[in-house]
Amino acid sequence: MGYIDLHIHTTASDGTQDPDELVKEILERGISHFSVTDHDSIDHVAQTAKLAKENNLKFIPGCEISVMYESQELHILTYGVDLDDHALHAILADNMQIREDHNNALIRYVCTQIPQISFEDYRDYEDDRKRGGWKSINYLVERGAVKDLGEFFDLIKDFGTPLTFKPHYDVLPRLKALGYPLVLAHPPAYFKGERLSEAWLDELRVLGISGIECYSPYFKHPEDSNYYIDYCKKHRMQITCGSDYHGRFIITRHLATPSKRPEDLMIKGLDFL
């Protein structure tokens, strides 16, 4: 078997590659098992599944769903998604509307600070999805309001209204009831990289989390990764690996990094096409 990567983004959210470009690179990197997990979107799942089948690759359809734990945004990798699941579509549509409303409010705020920016100009702006990111950041960079992603996040802080999704205790049970394996993405991304307590992980597990992304570029020390591996083994949860690849949008991340093979993980319950 080749490598496995279960956390990849395309132009359906904030990546820079369409499915054709992505699958070509997957073949070049020697990946045999993979998933596309765009933020709150399954728009490219069908096309990627078709390409995977044509190239004898093992593919599991997925998406990355945002929820809130109090004031902390959590990302939940959701696997085996059914493209005809109306209940799932409703959850994704809610999140996309929340994101769009926040972006619109942010741009209206910027308009009060920078006279040459107008909401009408933003509304008519045609975003090039292969740049990666979102329409709001690409617009502000192109208009000279911010230089990069760091300044964009600083602007959101100045705006004072954080992007807020629905609470974890609302969304996780709904996804669990739909029968989807739910994996907590990149644990070090939350709460300033502190290890998440077993009690906190227990709460998520009861609500529906069935696995943890124990191998991720977010881990800086092996012992931190091992902490989550031990927790998963104790509770017979999935142990997954993902690069959180965005193509050229985040140049420090690469496919199949960390480099793991399916036999290195615990992925029982994840059904590949």
Image (tube, helix red, strand yellow):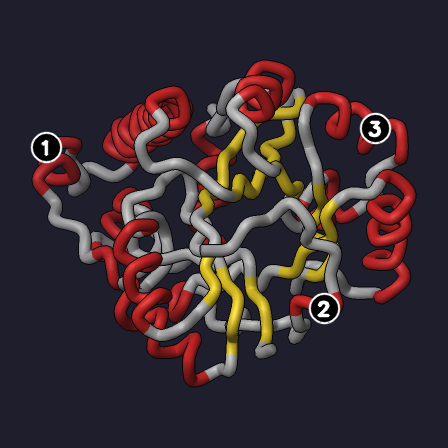
In terms of image quadrants, where is residue 200? top right
Q: Where does label 3 land, which residue?
A: 202
Are discs 3 and 2 less than 8 Å apart at CB?
A: no
Neighbour tally class for label 2: few under 14, some 14-19, many 20 plus, Cα within 10 Å:
few
Q: Where does label 2 land, which residue?
A: 263
SS category of the residue bearing label 1: helix
Name the spot of residue 90 as percent of width and height, x first.
35, 21
Q: Where does label 1 land, which residue?
A: 120
- Residue located 71% across and 43% down the image: 211
Sooner in the amino-acid sequence: mark 3 or mark 2: 3
In terms of image quadrants, where is residue 220? bottom right
Asked if 137 appears above or below 118 in the picture, the reply is below
Q: Amino acid at mark 3?
A: Asp
In terms of image quadrants, where is residue 118? top left
Name the spot of residue 243 as percent of width and height, x first.
57, 64
Sooner in the amino-acid sequence: mark 1 or mark 3: 1
- Residue located 40% across and 58% down the image: 148
Residue depth check, mark 2 versus mark 1: number of the one nearer the observer: 2
Residue depth check, mark 1 versus mark 3: number of the one nearer the observer: 3
Judged left or right of residue 168, residue 32 is left
Asked if 178 appears above or below 188 in the picture, the reply is above
- Residue located 48% across and 53% down the image: 60
Sooner in the amino-acid sequence: mark 2 or mark 1: 1
Neighbour tally class for label 1: few under 14, some 14-19, many 20 plus, Cα within 10 Å:
few
